[in-house]
Amino acid sequence: MHPGCLIEHVYLCRAPVDFRKQIDGLSVMVEQGLGLNPFASALYVFINRQRTKIKVLYWHRNGFCLWQKRLESDRFAWVPKYDQRDAQSDTQAVSMQEFEWLLEGFDLWKNKPHKTLEFASVLKEKILK
């Protein structure tokens, strides 16, 4: 992204898009198709059908910015059609850190964090061990 550009949200468009679309087509899709504000401090991320390319659209001060990443021999992990986090939406909101992981090749939906453990007492757990 542009240095100094404040990004508050990252939205992944669930459905693949036609990559012939450029700034005008994607910004209309954000506003009318996804119901989001293309001028917000957010990244709008799109993927092609083969999941080998990502396009990112965002507004910076006085104009839209668009960048693309193409993988040469792999595919991006992408939002499952029925993700439990937000199954009703056309977009999936992720953090900036999660977006960076996605660009690096991590599958955010297959990798699970460590289980949350609930203990009632520290002493009781030490005695059981």
Image (cartoon, helix red, strand yellow):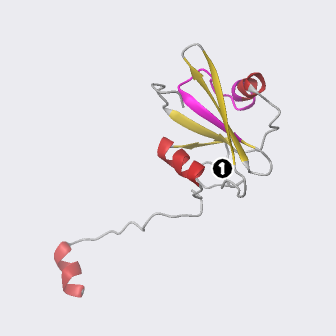
Q: To which quarter of the image does residue 111 belong?
A: bottom right
**Residue at x-position 67% and y-position 52%:** 78
Query: Image point 58% across, 13% down: which residue?
Result: 62
Is 31 within the magenta? Answer: yes
Judging by the rendered image, the residue that carries numbered circle 1 is: 87
Along the line of sight, which residue is nearer the eye, 80 or 60? Answer: 60
Q: Quadrant of residue 110?
A: bottom right
Q: For this view, does 24 lie left or right of residue 45?
A: right
- Image coordinates of residue 49 in percent, x first then y, are 80, 48
Q: The C terminus appears in which quarter of the rendering?
A: bottom left
Q: Is residue 113 above or below residue 69?
A: below
Q: Nearer the viewer, residue 59 or 37?
A: 59
Q: Who's the residue at 78% across and 25% down the image?
A: 25
Residue at (63%, 25%) from the top-left corner? 65
Secondary element at image label 1: loop
Q: Residue 70: x, y in percent?
A: 70, 45
Task: Using the image, determine if residue 74 lies above or below residue 44.
Answer: below
Residue that lies at the very extreme toward the left in this rendered image: 123
Q: Is residue 20 magenta?
A: no
Q: Is residue 90 left or right of residue 25?
A: left
| Quadrant placement of the N terminus | top right
State the image coordinates of residue 42 (x, y, percent, origin top left): 55, 30
Residue type indicated by callout 1:
Ala
- Residue 38 appears left or right of 123: right
Q: Position of residue 24 (x, y in %)?
A: 76, 21
Viewer-side residue, 110 vs 104: 104
What residue range appears in magenta? 30-46
